[in-house]
Amino acid sequence: VTKVEPFEVEAITRQLVKHFIEIYGAPSPEAARPVAEEEVSQMMEICADHAPNTLLTVGRELTESGVREGYRFIEPQDAGIDQFAVHGSLDDDGHGGHGHSH
């Protein structure tokens, strides 16, 4: 989940229109656009109540009555600075601080 600007929503919608035409055989951009807009709108609604960096997983299962979708949200974890790798040295070693000469 992340915040998107209006121009990004438009770009996502255009890409989805293209995908619907190229992959699923939609007959035209005019036919594909309303479907793409609805898909983007639904995803924005699903994500609206979640914090940035929340992961959304979508599972699909083919059943006798059609495709059943299930959603799972994985909340971002607080990460301490010690959980990130530090490469190199902060001490000046005479080589510009990165451990080797050029």
Image (spheres, rainbow, N blue to C red):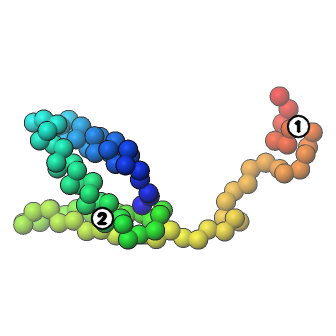
Residue 20 image-quadrant placement: top left
> Observer-nearest residue: 36 or 87?
36
Tell me, for residue 87, which label it has, or none: none
Q: Could you tell me which quadrant the N terminus lies in?
A: bottom left
Q: CA distance from mark 1 to mark 2?
A: 52 Å
Q: Earlier in the sequence, mark 1 or mark 2?
A: 2
> Observer-nearest residue: 4 or 71?
4
Residue 31: give x, y in percent of width and height. Answer: 11, 41
22 lies above or below 39: above
Secondary structure category for the residue under label 1: loop
Q: Which residue is mark 2?
A: 45
Residue 19 visible: no
Q: Which residue is mark 1?
A: 95
Residue 13 image-quadrant placement: top left
Amino acid type indicated by mark 1: His
Q: Residue at x 44, y 57 (%)?
A: 3
> Observer-nearest residue: 98 or 48?
48
Residue at the extreme front: 6
Q: Is residue 20 left or right of residue 51?
A: left
Mark 1 or 2: in front is: 2
Q: Is residue 75 left or right of residue 57?
A: right
Residue at the extreme right: 94
Secondary structure category for the residue under label 2: helix
Amino acid type indicated by mark 2: Glu
